[in-house]
Image: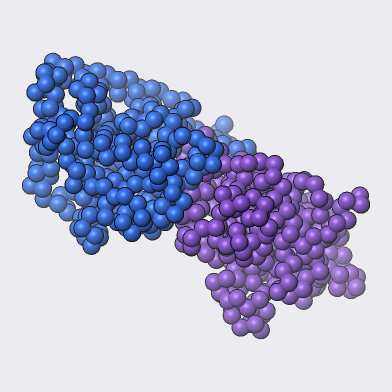
Chain colours: A purple, B blue
């Protein structure tokens, strides 16, 4: 790394910096959503933008998700590059028609002619007792529905690079940030939420996974905050003589299937970890990918650590009970190794 | 309710349009009616997918689209082919879309019309964003959006009206109150006396017009367009009209309305009163009518040939229209689909 990359930022500040730099470079980029202006975004993703770019390009909206997501689609069709924030992904229920029936499908319905280059940003995840309507990840839902790219950064470097890629992409991109990776003062401290971020604009390709830690005995595939949990688990496992490879998917659509298959061919064992619900989600898709692409290489049936199919509990101990953590990942890997 | 031309062809006050322009818009109404009847017939023959006819609403659509500038955005619903054609959307694409060919949803360059919306009301928001971006870019264009009385019960209507008013955007909300949300009559949809009066709550003007009166529709829409272009914000127009046909070709309206009601509305036909108006000014003859109908049929027949002559769709296209560039998983899925049909 050069000295310039040693500057450290939290993930939240890296996101805000990416947006600011793209707004600086391109007058058609703008931000809209609830509390994105004066407040700077409820999770700080648009911090400082109002002062720099003014209320015409950093637009606070009424509580009207269908309204402003739909308006964002219209603005994108006319050549703008909107960044529209859905405050919590849990609120998708009131505006999903705009997201999956309009934003994601207009390109197809127009025979590929009408482009919707917009970024839908949204905060995901639990772990801070915010209960069942403010703590879900739900990325499996968005990744399931055709027509939108879905990215989930886990660290400051990827957060900035993926945001710049998302803004420049000519397709709709859903940018889902886990609250636990942002480095917010009021969340449980997370040393992995701060890291080196180059000052200059750069991109991280959408659709490419990263090997967050190399290993040879077992592959742990995950995304978002559970990448941090898996890295913690890998350290514990190393002490026990088990070498775990951690794959950070970074994008769910397109999914880097090759990275999954290649790693499984190397380690012969697969654990998939997800903070989304277990059934019909990312874990099933990754296991299917490994089985389709590396069946003969598997030494044990793949295992999953995911949230059971229940709402995220309000109670702190019950919430911790359902969320994946390092201990559950260690236990899962040990089961795999014994198999 | 604004009415300038009565069903019996009497003008109230000075005619707002010249005889020449009236003739051109009458011709347009003959053309779109020919199109509409042709599409209903093609559907019966299995050559079109489900079709939503608009007979009875010709003046509402033609009269409201006529005052637009060519670059003005139009965001319309599945029943608004007449308005879309007025704004430059070619017949053959309107037909192709109705055969199920997504290429029919591809607006030609310089035609500022989005593919028609199927979801009820969602597209109104896109007009809000289009108008907002037009203002950002310093463009003169405004956005008009077409929807029915049924859509005004959707939350999307509320959010679109509110946002457009809050930001003072150049949007014309054009509601064709055709009296039914499939089977539910207008009076059962809302306790408001009119749909136009809903505008008051959003702080924008609301105008109710006789939607079968070409002159009233044209006049009210032209005023709303002027307001929008001048930066004076959005307007809601309620065009009171009637869907003479079924909701779609899958619907049987006799299950929810009396034939006598339909007959009553037939007597308020939007074309007939303009015909009388022109006839009284020696600007309409049966020969001209016959010529118009023949020309319209020929032009639409040709468009049907063009639409039906488009290359076969093939399974590859459904993948290729998904993204700007085809991502790896769709490359794989396309290959699998092509293998399955032996390609």
- For residue B165, side relative to residue B217 (left or right): right
- For residue B317, side relative to residue B331 (left or right): left
- For residue A6, side relative to residue B88 (left or right): right
> Residue A11 at what x, y percent from top left?
74, 60
> Residue A180 at what x, y percent from top left?
70, 68
Residue closer to the observer: B30 or A45: A45
Q: How many marks?
A: 0
Image quadrant assignment for residue A139: bottom right
> Residue A202 at what x, y percent from top left?
77, 45
Q: Considering the image in quadrants, where does the C terminus of chain A appear? A: bottom right
Residue closer to the observer: A7 or A131: A7
> Residue visible at 34% across and 30% down?
B85
> Residue visible at 59% across and 68% down?
A136
> Residue A317 at what x, y percent from top left?
66, 84
Q: Compared to B233, does B275 lie above or below?
A: above
> Residue visible at 77% across and 76% down?
A327
Q: Compared to A196, does B238 lie above or below?
A: above
Image quadrant assignment for residue A12: bottom right
> Residue visible at 32% across and 54% down?
B199
């Amino acid at each position: 790394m050069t000295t310039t990359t040693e500057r450290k930022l939290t993930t939240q500040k890296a996101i805000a910096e990416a947006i600011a730099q793209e707004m600086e470079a391109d007058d058609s980029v703008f931000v809209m959503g609830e509390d994105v202006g004066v407040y700077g975004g409820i999770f700080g993703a648009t911090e400082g933008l109002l002062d720099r770019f003014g209320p015409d390009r950093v637009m606070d909206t009424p509580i009207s998700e269908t309204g402003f997501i739909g308006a964002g689609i219209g603005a994108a069709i006319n050549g703008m590059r909107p960044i529209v924030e859905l405050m919590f992904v849990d609120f998708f229920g009131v505006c999903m028609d705009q997201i999956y029936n309009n934003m994601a499908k207009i390109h197809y319905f127009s025979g590929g002619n009408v482009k919707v280059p917009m970024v839908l940003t949204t905060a995901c995840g639990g772990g801070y007792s915010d209960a069942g309507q403010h703590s879900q990840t739900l990325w499996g839902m968005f990744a399931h529905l055709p027509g939108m790219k879905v990215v989930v950064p886990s660290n400051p470097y990827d957060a900035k690079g993926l945001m710049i890629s998302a803004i420049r992409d000519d397709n709709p991109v859903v940018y889902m940030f886990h609250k636990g990776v942002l480095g917010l003062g009021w969340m449980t401290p997370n040393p992995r939420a701060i890291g080196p971020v180059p000052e200059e604009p750069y991109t991280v390709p959408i659709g490419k996974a990263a090997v967050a830690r190399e290993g040879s005995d077992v592959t742990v595939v995950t995304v978002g905050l559970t990448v941090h949990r898996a890295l913690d688990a890998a350290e514990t496992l190393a002490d026990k003589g088990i070498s775990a490879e951690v794959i950070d998917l970074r994008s769910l659509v397109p999914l880097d299937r090759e990275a999954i298959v290649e790693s499984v061919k190397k380690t012969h064992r697969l654990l998939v970890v997800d903070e989304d619900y277990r059934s019909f989600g990312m874990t099933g898709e990754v296991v299917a990918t490994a089985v389709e692409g590396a069946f003969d290489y598997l030494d044990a049936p793949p295992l999953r650590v995911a949230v059971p199919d229940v709402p995220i509990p309000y109670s702190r101990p019950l919430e911790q009970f359902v969320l994946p953590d390092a201990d559950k990942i260690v236990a899962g890997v040990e089961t795999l190794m014994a198999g | 309710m604004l009415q300038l031309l009565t069903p019996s062809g009497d003008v109230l006050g000075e005619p707002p349009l010249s005889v020449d322009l009236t003739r051109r818009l009458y011709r347009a109404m003959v053309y779109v009616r020919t199109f509409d009847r042709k599409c209903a017939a093609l559907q019966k023959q299995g050559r079109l997918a489900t079709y939503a006819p608009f007979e009875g609403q010709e003046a509402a659509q033609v009269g409201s689209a006529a005052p637009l500038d060519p670059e003005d955005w139009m965001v319309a619903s599945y029943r608004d082919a007449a308005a879309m054609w007025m704004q430059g959307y070619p017949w053959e694409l309107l037909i192709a879309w109705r055969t199920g060919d997504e290429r029919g949803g591809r607006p030609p360059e310089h035609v500022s019309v989005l593919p028609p919306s199927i979801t009820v009301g969602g597209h109104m928001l896109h007009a809000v964003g289009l108008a907002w971006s037009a203002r950002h870019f310093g463009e003169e264009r405004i956005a008009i959006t077409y929807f029915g009385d049924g859509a005004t019960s959707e939350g999307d209507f509320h959010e679109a009206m509110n946002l457009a008013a809050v930001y003072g955007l150049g949007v014309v909300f054009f509601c064709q109150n055709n009296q039914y949300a499939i089977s539910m009559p207008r009076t059962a949809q809302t306790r408001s006396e009119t749909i136009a009066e809903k505008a008051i709550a959003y702080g924008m003007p609301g105008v109710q017009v006789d939607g079968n009166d070409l002159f009233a529709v044209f006049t009210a829409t032209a005023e709303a367009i002027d307001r929008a272009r001048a930066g004076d914000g959005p307007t809601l127009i309620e065009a009171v009209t009637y869907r003479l046909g079924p909701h779609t070709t899958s619907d049987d309206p006799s299950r929810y309305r009396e034939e006598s009601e339909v007959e009553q509305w037939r007597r308020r036909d939007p074309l007939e009163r303009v015909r009388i108006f022109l006839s009284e000014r020696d600007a309409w003859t049966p020969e001209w009518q016959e010529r118009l109908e023949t020309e319209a049929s020929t032009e639409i027949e040709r468009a049907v040939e063009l639409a039906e002559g488009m290359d076969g769709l093939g399974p590859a296209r459904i993948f290729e229209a998904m993204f700007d560039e085809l991502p790896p998983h769709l490359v794989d899925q396309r290959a699998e689909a092509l293998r399955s049909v032996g390609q």
